[in-house]
Amino acid sequence: MKNIFQNAVFGLFFWLLQSNAALACTCAIPEFGTIWNAADAVFTGKVTTITPVEKYRKNPLDEMPVIVELDITENFKGIEKEKTFTLHTSLNEHTCTGYPFRTGESYVVFAYQRTDGTFERWSFYNFPSGTWDTGGLCGGTQDAGVAHDTLDLLRARKEAPKETLIDKLMPRPAEPGDDSAKD
C-alpha cells in the first residue's frame, strides 16, 4: 500500500512538471476591429526599461508586477505628442495578464487605461486608476518583428482618407474640435 501511495505521489508530481504548457494561458486573438475599438491607445514602441514594483504584488508566489517604459516610434490612436509611454503590467509568466516584454525589443502596443471604480478583467494587480496596461495576453499587443499584418492595417487606416470602408470597421477617434465623430 505504501508503494502505491508513493507511486501515485511521484506520478502526480511528474504529471505536474510535464503539464506546465497545458496550464499556460492561451487565447483566441480577437478580430482586429474589436481590439482597435476597445484599446484606448495604439502605437509602436521600443522598450527602454522594465522596473519591478514589489508594492503591488499580492503574495510572494505571484509574478512580479512591473513598469515598462517605451519610446514611441509610431502613433496610431489615443496619444498625441508623447515620445514615451509607461505601462503598469506584468511579464505574463503565469497569468493571462500583461505581456512578455523584453528590454530593447519593439512592439505594436494596444494599451488600455484603468478607470476608477472598475475591475479590469485583464489586470491582475491593483495599479492606480489612470495607469495603462496591455489588456492581457489577448489584448492585441504583439512583437513588432512579426506583426506585419497588424502594422499594414494600422498604416492603411492612418493614411486612408476619412469615410472609407476601413473607418466603418475601425472608427477613427474624435479629433479635438471635430463634432462629426459624435454620431
Image: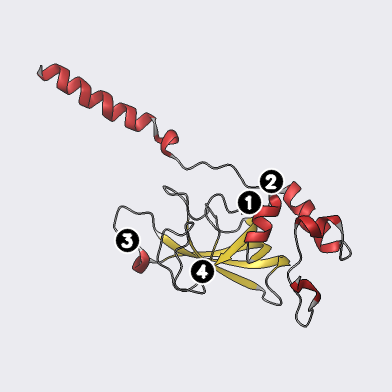
Nearer the camera: disc 2 or disc 4:
4
The image quadrant that residue 84 belongs to is: bottom right
Question: Which residue is denoted by mark 4 in the rendering?
Answer: 114
Q: Crowding near pointer 3: few (<14 within 10 Å), some, many (20+)?
A: some
Disc number for residue 146: 2
How crowded pointer 4 is (Cα within 10 Å; few <14, some 14-19, many 20+) is rated as many
Tag 2 secondary structure: loop
**Which numbered tag is attached to residue 58?**
3
Name which of mark 3 and mark 1 comes first in the sequence: 3
- Which residue lies most toward the left here? 2
The secondary structure type at the circle numbered 4 is loop
Q: Quadrant of the C terminus?
A: bottom right
Q: Residue 166: x percent and y percent?
A: 82, 56
Q: Check disc 1 and report the residue beneath it.
A: 142
Mark nearest the camera among 4 and 1 is 4
Label 1: few (<14), some or many (≥20) within 10 Å? many
Q: Residue 118 location, x and y as percent?
A: 46, 67
- Which residue is at 43% across, 69% downward? 127
Residue flagged by tag 3: what amino acid is it?
Lys
* Left or right of 99 on screen, residue 59: left
